[in-house]
Image (cartoon, grey):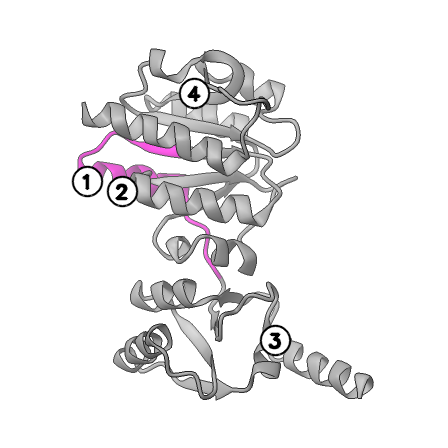
Amino acid sequence: MEQIETRQKKIQQAELKPEELKLEGRNAVLEAIRSGTQIDRLFLLRGCADGPIQSIVREAKKREITVQFVDKMRLNNLSETGKHQGAIAVAAAYSYASVEDMLQAAREKGESPFLILLDGIEDPHNLGAVIRTANLAGAHGVIIPKRRAVGLTASVAKASAGAISYTPVARVTNLTAEMKRLKEQGLWFVCADMSGALMYDLDLKGPIGLVIGGEGGGVSDLVRKNCDFTASVPMRGNINSLNASVAAGVLAYEIVRQRMV
């Protein structure tokens, strides 16, 4: 029996091309369809007719996306996260945006650029959560490095709850070099660091890049040296650090608050 299941899993995995992106979870799949993401294949749990699944079916019909109703074992075999919630979409290869796309989006909206830069985030759930926060906070994009950092995976898409379909993500070779280039275009940078000034005491308006460090060592020395300010989040508990995505959310919304004043 175990050999049969192993063989079935290999067959299912062979159905997916390595350049394709799997979107797992009801929110991620629904928002991808609504945003116009090209969906090559859509797998839904056979016999499931609750509200979220029916919403996916309706949106798929509008866009003439073929739905395949399959059993739970098939979904489990296709799943990379183990949390598919009865819905998996196979999208065309995800195209990273360019940083210029983000700046252009800000210009078209008549807004000062607001970018979030991640220095060595390796946890896909943190990256997904930051993309979700970036979307809700009105950031124009997220910039990640190509090396020593997680890219756009199925787990990231799931953790973003669909925001990956709306928020551009750029991948750059050298984060410091990109920051220097953006400084020439008027952006300034603030990084999260517990030794920095209290975030409420800083002027976070205008064209800004918020830099968040990795889960282990935080912002690297070289990146920190190229930031204009460091900002700390007030702490009142017994430990002295926040999860990277939580820190990003707290600081992003301080930027939002100051822009609303």
**Which residue type does callout 3 highlight?**
Asn
Graded by Cα atoms within 10 Å as few (under 14), some (14 to 19) or many (20 or more), the crowding at tag 1 reads few
Question: Circle 4 is placed at which residue position?
Answer: 190
**Which circle's residue, 2 or 4, is located before the other in the chain?**
2
In the image, which residues are magenta? 94-115
Q: CA distance from mark 1 to mark 4?
A: 23 Å
Classify mark 2: residues with Cα within 10 Å, few (<14), some (14-19) or many (20+). some
Q: Amino acid at mark 1?
A: Lys
Q: Quadrant of residue 55?
A: bottom left
The label nearer to you, 1 versus 4, is 4
* Residue 65 position in % (x across, y down): 36, 81
Q: Which residue is mark 1?
A: 109
Spot occupied by residue 179 in the image (x, y as percentages of width and height): 46, 26
Q: Disc 3 and disc 1: Cα gap in Å?
A: 42 Å
Query: Distance of mark 2 from mark 1, alpha carbons?
Result: 6 Å
Along the polypeptide, which appears first: circle 3 or circle 2?
Answer: 3
Say whether residue 222 is left or right of residue 118: right
Which residue is label 2 attached to? 105
3D distance between C-alphas at marks 4 and 3? 42 Å
